[in-house]
Image (spheres, helix red, strand yellow):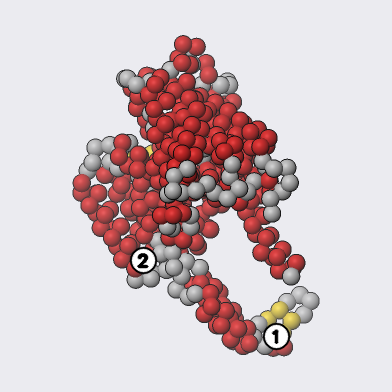
Amino acid sequence: MDRTINVILKPLRRFATQKSSASFLLFMATILAMILANSPWAYAYHHILSYPIDLQIGKFNLFSHHGEPMPMLAFVNDALMAVFFFVIGLEIKQEVLIGELSSVRKAILPVIAACGGMIVPVLFFLLVCNTGPEARGAAIPMATDIAFALAVLGLLGKRVPLSMRIFLTALAVVDDIGGIIIIALFYSGHIAYQPLLISLALLALLYAGGKMRVNNNLFYYIVGFFVWILFLESGIHPTIAGVLVAFTVPARPKINLNDFTCDMTGYLNMLDYTEVRQSKKAAVLTPTQIQVLNNIHSLADRTISPLQSIADKLHPMVNYLILPLFAFVNAGVTFGDIQPASLVNVPLAVFLGLFVGKTLGIFSFTYFFARTSLASMPAGMTRWNLFGVSMLGGIGFTVALFIANLSFNTTDAVGMDLLNQAKLGVFTGSFVSGLCGYLLLKKVLPKAANE
C-alpha cells in the first residue's frame, strides 16, 4: 500500500519542485535584467532587445510584422507569450469543464474575489494617475502572477489548507480571464478585417476538428500558428489567438481509462517474455512483440486528451524558457532615468494598486459576499487567512509587466519613461505584497501540518 501511495505522490512532489525552481529561474532572470540595464553593459543589453529575429522559409519570414523582422522584444512579447497564453487558455478550459469553475456554486466565490481584485486596484491607480498618458496604465495592477503567488504559498508547506490553495488558484484563473478580456478590448490596434475573417474561419475549422474528435496535436499546432499570424496582421493582439485556439482543443480522449485497462490486459497477455533473445549486451524482440508494444504506445496516446497532452508538453517550455526570457527582456528598469519627483506618479499608482488595492479588493469582496446566503467561506479559511491570501494576489509581476508594455507608447521618450516607472511599481508592489502575505500567513496559520 505504501509503495502504491509513493508511486502516486512522487510525480506530484516532482511537479511542486519544478514549480518552485521555475519561479526561482524567473526571479534570477529579473535580477540579471535589472543589473545589466544599470551597468556598463546596458548598451549591449538594449542591443539584444532590438536584435531582429529572421527565420526564413524561402522568401517568407515566419516572425515578421508589416514586412519587417520582429525585434527580440516584440518576438518575446507577441510570439512566445502567445504560447504562454495558449497554455493559460488550456488551463482555463480545464477549470471550466471539470475544475473549480465547472459549476456556479464552485465558481461564484473566486469570481467575486477576482472582480474585487480587478476593480479596486484600478480605482487606487486612478486616485494617483487619472489624466494624460499615465492613465493608460490603470489595468497594470489588475494582474496576479499565479506561479509566484503559489510559490510563496508553497514556502509554508503543509501548514496551508488545501482549500486555500484551491481558492488562490481559481481566483488567479478568473483573474487571467479578466486580463485576457482587457487586452482584447483595450490594447488592440486598428482592425484589418480581411485577415481577421480568415483567422475566424480557421478557428471554426479547429472547433469542427475538436467536435469530430481530431486528436492529432500537430493539427492544432499548425492551424493555430496560422491563426496567430493572421491575428498579428489584423491588429488584434496576437496573444488572444493563443487563448482562442486553446478553447478549441478537445478535452476528452478517444479511449477512456476503463477501456484502456481492458485492452492493456489483452496486450500484456500477448507478450511472451520467453521469446526474447537476450544476452548481457543486447536484447532482441520478435516482430509480434514490437507490434504489440507499438499498439500499447498508440493506445496510451489516445487515452490522454489533446488538452492534457499539449499542456503537459508545453509547461516545461513555458516555465523554463518563455517566462524567464520574458522577464529578462522586460524587467530591465533603468533606475538612473527615474527622477525622485516621478516616484509619486506611476510607480506609486501601480504600487498602491497591487499592494493596497488587490488586498482590500479581494478581501472585502470575498468576506462580505461569503456572509450572504449565496456562498460560504472555504473550509479552513479564516478572516486572517483570507487577508494573507489577498495580499499574495498583489504579486502581479509577469502579467502586470506584460500589460505595462501594452499600456504605453514606447516609440517616444515619454512612453519609455512611463514604462520604466511602471516596471518599478510592479517590482516594488509585487515584492511587498509577497513578503507581507508570507509573513502574515506564517504568523496566523496553525503550526501543526494540515493533513
Q: Which of 348/305 is in front?
A: 348
Contact between labelled residues 1 and 2, with CB atoms less than 8 Å apart? no
Q: Name the residue type under label 2.
A: Gly
Q: Which label sits in the foreground, 2 or 1?
A: 2
Residue farthest along the top direction in this orientation = 341
Q: Which of 167/253 is in front?
A: 167
Which residue is denoted by mark 2 in the rendering?
Answer: 210
Residue at position x 61%, y 51% from top? 162
- Image coordinates for residue 258, horizontal then vertical, percent: 53, 78
- Image coordinates for residue 293, horizontal then vertical, percent: 59, 79
- Quadrant showing the C terminus: bottom right
Write down the quadrant of residue 137 in the picture: top left
Mark 1: few/some/many CA within 10 Å (<14, 14-19, 20+) = few
Secondary structure found at label 1: helix
Q: Name the residue type under label 1.
A: Tyr
Mark 2: few/some/many CA within 10 Å (<14, 14-19, 20+) = many
Residue at position x 55%, y 82% from top? 263
**In the rendered image, the vertical position of residue 356 relative to residue 223, given as above or below:** above
Which residue is denoted by mark 1 in the rendering?
Answer: 273
Q: Is residue 229 left or right of residue 37?
A: left
Q: Is residue 228 left or right of residue 347?
A: left
Residue farthest along the left direction in this orientation = 194
Query: Is residue 60 visible in the rendered structure shown here?
Result: no
Q: Which of 384/256 is in front?
A: 384
**In the rendered image, the vertical position of residue 338 relative to residue 409, given as above or below:** above
- Quadrant showing the N terminus: bottom right
Which of the two labelled residues, at mark 2 and mark 1, occupies the earlier sequence position?
2
Residue at position x 32%, y 42% from top? 184
From mark 2 to mark 1, how far is it between C-alphas? 40 Å
